[in-house]
Amino acid sequence: MKLSQIGEFGLINRLNRQIISATEKRWRSSQELIIGIGDDAAVWKPQNPFQIITTDALIEGVHFSLKTSTWNELGWKSVAVNLSDIAAMGGIPMYALVSLGLPKDILVENIQSFYEGMLAATKKFEVVVIGGDTVGSPLVVVSVTIIGHAFNEDGKVLTRSAAKPGDKVAVTGYLGGSSAGLAMLNRGLKFPSKAAAELRRAHLQPNPRVVEGQKLVASGVTAGMDISDGLVGDLTHICEMSHAGALINVDAVPVSPTADKYFGDNALECALGGGEDYELLFTAPARVVQRAKKSMDCPITVIGEITAEHRGKVVLVDSSGAVINLKKRGWDAFKK
């Protein structure tokens, strides 16, 4: 059935039922919510006064292709990239607003599949969808806003501006899988089914490190962000805002084992500059990093150090100390 056959309000009624059935009353987000989806606006009474809000837009042909992504995967990723921004602050996500621009000849079943993927992500992190909008558009456009709050009522969060010379630079998990997955999809590369599924999932269904971000705050980490634009590009943002530099040992960077196996030398390039891994990048004194490591279920790898020299820049070296040049420095939406 096409969207034009049921119209905007027919679609909204279907989606509202889908959202309500995926929401659980036991969630803290549900308990603080006073007026939810279906009214002109949502109302909630937050217990924590330090609110966090983030938004991202995804445009067909720019940020995703429906030739390589299913609607379900697109729904998951649309929410996951926003949840990752909350994770980057060490916050707790609570509510989501979802707006869609849709062609009128689109199948309603595809939109519902999108919501299935999206609601799988919101349910995992106990986030309530409280509203949004639908409009006609020649291309599919997705805009998601996530609202959350600081981990503690003291308002402490991770920021890009808190790195200090002498801090160790560390990352969660493994890097390069998303970029390798994108290359596999775009080039039609064939790998064994398990490897192909892992790389596809890394790019299209990333796992935002929400709990890990909270554990970083609890461990005393103050500087961090998520890796969305590439390790080097994002670390450069931290250096610029902290008025410091960084020295990174590329041999210490935790490259995705699957990307490393099937992409060889290019896997390191994917890890350093590919982006969309949505792991957490943070800096802290060595003792704080060790404390964070002990609290985590995922790997934490120290890859370098913040320096007083080379302000606003990231210097890459290998284990021998030789300087390495990187071709790709990270994603920029307005550069070719």
Image (cartoon, rainbow, N blue to C red):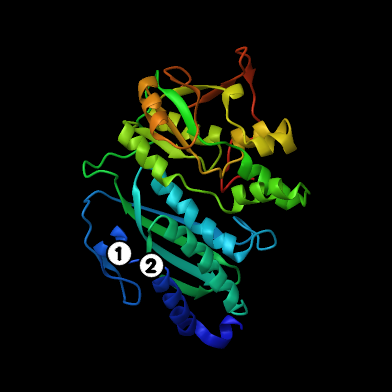
93 over 321 or under it: above or below = below
Q: Amino acid at mark 2?
A: Thr
Q: Quadrant of the N terminus?
A: bottom right
Between 238 and 221, the one lying in front of the other is 221
Q: Which mark is residue 23?
A: 2
Q: Amino acid at mark 1?
A: Ser
| Residue depicted at 42% across the width and 17% down the height | 308
- The mark tally for this picture is 2
Rendered location of residue 186, percent (x, y)? 72, 52
**Earlier residue among tags 1 and 2:** 2
Q: Would you identify the image quadrant in which residue 60 lies?
A: bottom right
Between 96 and 172, the one lying in front of the other is 172
Rendered location of residue 103, percent (x, y)? 59, 75
286 over 123 or under it: above or below = above
Rendered location of residue 25, percent (x, y)? 31, 66
| Residue depicted at 40% across the width and 18% down the height | 166
Q: Is residue 220 left or right of residue 2?
A: left
| Residue depicted at 65% across the width and 35% down the height | 257
Q: How many C-alpha atoms fall within 10 Å of the one at disc 1: few (<14), some, or many (≥20)?
A: many
Rendered location of residue 92, percent (x, y)? 34, 49
Alpha-carbon span between mark 1 and mark 2: 8 Å
Q: Quadrant of the C terminus?
A: top right
For the question of whether residue 254 can be seen, the reply is yes
Read off the residue under disc 1: 30
